[in-house]
Image (spheres, rainbow, N blue to C red):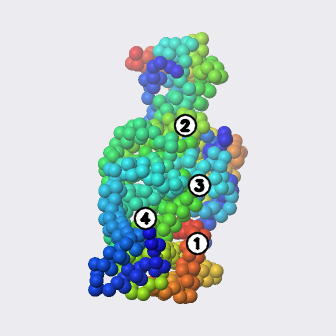
Amino acid sequence: MAPKSIKLLIPAISPAATGALYEQIVTGLKRAVSEGRIKSGEALPSFRQLAEELMVSVITVKRAYEELEREGIIYRRQGLGTFVAERGQDRSCEAKLDQAKALLKAAAKEAVEAGLKPAEIRRMFLETLNESL
Amino acid sequence: MNPTSAIKFSSVEKQRYPKFTLGPVTLNVPTGAIYGLIGPNGAGKTTLMNLIFGMSAVNAGAIEVCGYDHQLDEVAVKQRTAYVGPELNFDTWGSVENAIRFVSGFYPSWDDGYCSQLMEKLKLSKNKLIQKLSFGSRIKLSLILALSWRPQVLVLDEPTTGLDAHGKQALFSELLSVVKDESRAVFISSHQISDLERFADHIGILHKGRMIAEGMIVDLLERFIRVGFVGVSGDAISRLPGMFVQQREGNQWRVVLDTKHCALASLTEHGARDVQSGPITLEELFIVLTK
Amino acid sequence: MCSPAPSPLKNCLSFLPNNMKLLSLDFCRRYWRTMALAIFLFLLSAISNLGIIFAMVFLFRPDVRSGLAEVMRIILPLPNNVKLLLLDFCSRWWKALTISVIFSALTAASGNPGMFPAVVILFLLRRDARNGVAKVMRTLPISSSERDRMIWFMVVLAGTILAIPAVMYGTWIYSRNQTTISIPDVWFGLFLAVLRSFGLAAAFFLCFVLGSDVRPVQFAERLRKILVWVIFFVQLTYHVSPKLETWDVLNYILMSLTVILSFCWRHKIRSDIS
């Protein structure tokens, strides 16, 4: 069992936030791992335990764990529990980078459809970057 | 007994006067799960739950709880199953303390410490007269009497009516800790679909005495999708199987699609354009299916 | 040591007022056992009537209930669930039961003091059922047969048992007032009074059970209903008389049969809950 409560390491899971509940858990855990708040090799709570902590159904947590396992960020050992993978942090970063790239692609597509030229798109991006940092 | 099914209804039928027939209903509550039963008023949810405890007689079919038949092994079933419902009336026992003392005598696994913990959590005091309690507090009393002896199976008939936000939070937190043990299960019926969407693993929709949908919530919400499109004139599209029309204005359509019976592609085959699909919430699905 | 005469009561009641001292001394010497019994019964009934009232008022109060439960657990050889149900019923309705016991003492001389508590208990049970206690009982791990047994015990037997001191008292009063008696001794009179009580309570129980209009009435049910009402009225023709005529003997046999019948048909009370 994780010594500290996972609940506090990831943003609150709520129907009001964006994305399905299980996606919120996946994103939250990925972030926590990539930022090093949960170290590689560290044990994660069982899905029933996590379901109780996060106040969501067991199925939701199961699905989140399955997704994370598929992406190689965590692994499960029968009888021992669930742990963060060795390259978990890197994988997590990789996954996040992939996602950022995909979002930028989508933004570029929208901008092109709106009729902006490449130079204008570049300027808009730099402005947005300065605003958000 | 070590079954994987906590409650199993097999082709259960119940006739209540010439008008209303419940069933045949086949339903399975697996162990380690929270199963939510939803349905419009009068669909038969309370009747179904009453059948388990012998409050009404089954006309056909069988009910098994943890492998025990509900009629032949009546006592074995009730030693493992707890019931909470709005019609339970403890008035005649006077105070909360008396009711607790009476009920606790029948269950050897009664946990006094857990009982006091629950009373604190749900903010119910021992000395209150049950007659003077509000509806929500009576439900809380029933819940405490049901949870304190750690039953294998919990059958809850609309326990969220009358509970405020704190109470609901406390209730679901306790229910989740109940299913932490994989051999236990919760069978709950509720009108608050948003609650069940968050906490329940399985869902069954009961409408006019029949189960019209059943399964894991995630599967159901993947199977049914919300689609908006611009269609051709004519009603050919609305007659496709698995198509539920929500709104239609001229050529603008808003529908819910059952992807098991009707693929998205078949819409475009029938001339739909600008097809946009998105996920559906359980509440919307419920409204569409029980129209 | 003289052996008691065949009808000691006859003798004890027919001594002459003259030479009282001599005769009474002689009488006491010869019939001391019977007299001791009579005095003992009188004291017992007086004390126990009061005792029962005190017991009800103090022992069934919730704060001392756990103590009584311990005592009951040791004394009563009933299965645990039935004990719990009986204890619970008595502790909830102790006020009504106390009043009915007091009244039973007042009607002791009628020869049938157990009937009043039986009727009261019946109506208390009915009130419980109306108030939803039946549904609560359904959720508890009690088998239907245990529930039926408890109801049968409360209606048919408990009323008379609670009134036994009054029955004894009544029998004693009755036997004192009779000039001619052919009943061998007081105990037999007591036995008959108890049997009468049981019989009438059982008849009441059956009337109630078969009189429920919840179920659709079939022909066989109708026959049973009529039979029970007939039994009930026949039993009311009992005689608290010194001579047991054939009719009385038949009546008492009928009463015993009614008690057995009520036990056999106790499951019919389940029809109250569809």
Determine whether C78 is above or below A3 in the image. Answer: below
Residue at image coords 59%, 55% = B52
**Label 1 residue SS:** helix
Residue at image coords 59%, 30% = A62
The chain containing the residue under callout 4 comes to C
Q: Which residue does the numbered mark 4 point to in the structure image?
A: C128
Question: What separation in Å lies between label 4 and label 3 (alpha carbons)?
Answer: 23 Å
Quick one: label 1 or label 4, which is nearer the N terminus? Answer: 4
Residue B52 is marked as 3
The residue nearer to you, when weighing A99 against B290, is B290
The chain containing the residue under callout 2 comes to B
Q: In the rendered structure, which amino acid carries the disc numbered 1?
A: Ile
Q: Look at the numbered discs 4 and 2 and tell me whether their residues touch, using CB distance below 8 Å.
A: no
The chain containing the residue under callout 1 comes to C
The chain containing the residue under callout 3 comes to B
Disc 4 packing (10 Å; few <14; some 14–19; many ≥20): some
